[in-house]
Image: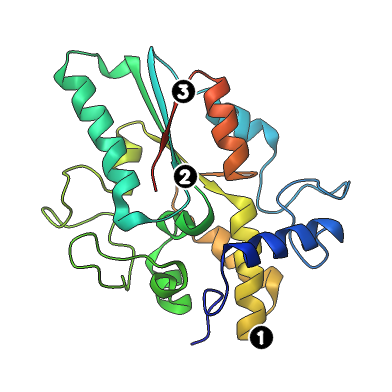
Amino acid sequence: MSTPRDGIQRRDFLGTLLASTTIGLAGLSAPINLAGAQEKPAAMSGSSDFETWLGKIKGKHRQVFDSPDPHGGLPLAWARVFLMTNKMVGVPDDDVSAVIVLRHDSIPLAMEDKLWKKYNFGKMFGAKDMMTNAILKRNVFWKPKEGSLPVPGMGVDELLNSGVLIGACDMALTVYSKMTAEKMKLNPDEVKKEWVAGVFPGIQLVPSGVLAINRAQEHGCTYCYAG
């Protein structure tokens, strides 16, 4: 199956993004009002949801993990280690906030297995097993089997249940779904809609990953590059 990653590098992603912006994101379900459109984007419930999500950042110790690459799931592991080691040094749970921003090639970590299978996300986004380096066929980080991941509690669902805030870049989701639709000769709006519906409950779609990282830092988070 042909995928957007076949022959497409990061500069192509940026080129597609810039071209889309220039023409007002014609043919896309725009995640933000780049072209002055009056209709609220389908992928976002409104800026109030984003601000409410940011408002959940709390406590003295706050860190945002910037994840532009799946990196074998390490961004998830580092967030868990941040929580674990704060606890080890006696910091109360309610005094710690971890925020993970999944952007660019990391967005499949936010989506369910059926999309991984249908669109071959493992190959498309270079998502590999941390231990074997094999291309992943499914999202092994959602409700993982006990002992299947190197760090206990690093599953996406486990992190969400621990209060970790996870945001997924709607801009990347929009651009990549369009590129995928064009490669597979599908309707871009329908593919985008399908991808949005496949985002796990509890994960916040953010207008863009870079915006979310900026806002998290404005809310007191220190920055950690997570791959």
Q: Which mark is residue 185?
A: 1
Q: Are marks 2 and 1 in contact (CB under 8 Å)?
A: no
Q: Earlier in the sequence, mark 2 or mark 1?
A: 1
Q: Which mark is residue 221?
A: 3
Q: CA distance from mark 2 to mark 3?
A: 18 Å
* Amino acid type, mark 2: Ile
x then y, percent, for residue 58: 43, 17
- Between 43 and 2, the one lying in front of the other is 2
Nearer the observer: mark 1 or 3; the answer is 3
The residue positioned 48% from the left and 87% from the top of the image is 1
* Amino acid type, mark 3: Cys
The residue positioned 15% from the left and 50% from the top of the image is 150
The secondary element bearing badge 3 is classed as: loop
Q: Is residue 11 left or right of residue 17?
A: left
x then y, percent, for residue 200: 44, 53
Q: CA distance from mark 1 to mark 3?
A: 42 Å
Q: Residues within 10 Å of mark 1 (few under 14, many from 20)?
A: few
Nearer the observer: mark 2 or 3; the answer is 3
Q: Is residue 39 left or right of residue 80?
A: right
Q: Earlier in the sequence, mark 1 or mark 3?
A: 1
Q: Earlier in the sequence, mark 2 or mark 3?
A: 2
* Amino acid type, mark 1: Lys
Residue 193 seen in the current view? no
Q: Which mark is residue 219?
A: none
State the residue position of label 2: 203
Residue 149 seen in the current view? yes
The secondary element bearing badge 2 is classed as: loop
